[in-house]
Amino acid sequence: MLKKFIVAFTILASCGSLFAAKGEKAEAATYDYHTAAISIAKSNIGVPYRWGGMAPSGFDCSGLVKYSYGKAGRTLNRTAAQMFYRDGYRPSNLQIGDLLFYAPSKASSPTHVAIYIGYGKMIMASSSKGVIITRTNNPYWHPRYIGAKRV
């Protein structure tokens, strides 16, 4: 009886380590597409703003996010509001790759989206400067922040 218990315990323990390995791989894959999306967005710094733009010839804010994540292998909805209401989940703390949403007022739907790149910075398509990196505490955007989503 003791031998059967030891054998069963050994099998279960090895299955547990297999599941952990799969979980670690899943986390690594998640990290990879977030960092890939950020790299793709960064490669487009300086691209001009174009309303409705979804290509390196010109981006609007959600077009940059959708394009960057799409090239990294993750399909997102088209507009900032659709991303906010339909994609991902609300994280308890910010991580690299999270989507940051902004609105004219706290009670309205989001009209702007950016990608958090860490260290208090975000990358976005600005209507005045094109694709840029700016700080999350930017005096224009900070008061308009309404939440984040992790995709």
Image: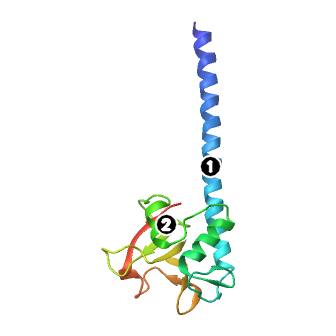
Q: For marks 2 and 1, give the CA distance.
A: 22 Å
- Disc 1: which residue: 26
Q: Is residue 118 visible?
A: no
Q: 114 left or right of 56? A: left
| Amino acid type of the residue tagged 1 in the rendering | Ala
The image shows residue 16, relative to residue 122, as above or below, that is above
Q: Earlier in the sequence, mark 2 or mark 1?
A: 1
SS at badge 2: helix
* Colour scheme of the picture: rainbow
Residue at the image position 61 percent from the left and 37 percent from the top: 19
- Disc 2: which residue: 83
Residue 64 location, quadrant: bottom right
Q: Residues within 10 Å of mark 2 (few under 14, many from 20)?
A: many
The image shows residue 73, relative to residue 128, as above or below, that is above
Between 112 and 140, the residue placed more toward the observer is: 112
Q: At which x and y percent is residue 85?
A: 43, 63
Q: At which x and y percent is residue 8?
A: 60, 18
Residue 30 location, quadrant: bottom right
Between 150 and 22, the residue placed more toward the observer is: 150
Q: 84 left or right of 28? A: left
Residue at the image position 46 percent from the left and 79 percent from the top: 136
| Amino acid type of the residue tagged 2 in the rendering | Met
Direction top: furthest residue: 1
Q: At which x and y percent is residue 46?
A: 65, 88
Direction front: furthest residue: 52
Q: 136 left or right of 49? A: left
The image shows residue 38, relative to residue 91, as above or below, that is below
Residue at the image position 47 percent from the left and 60 percent from the top: 86
The numbered dot on residue 39 is none
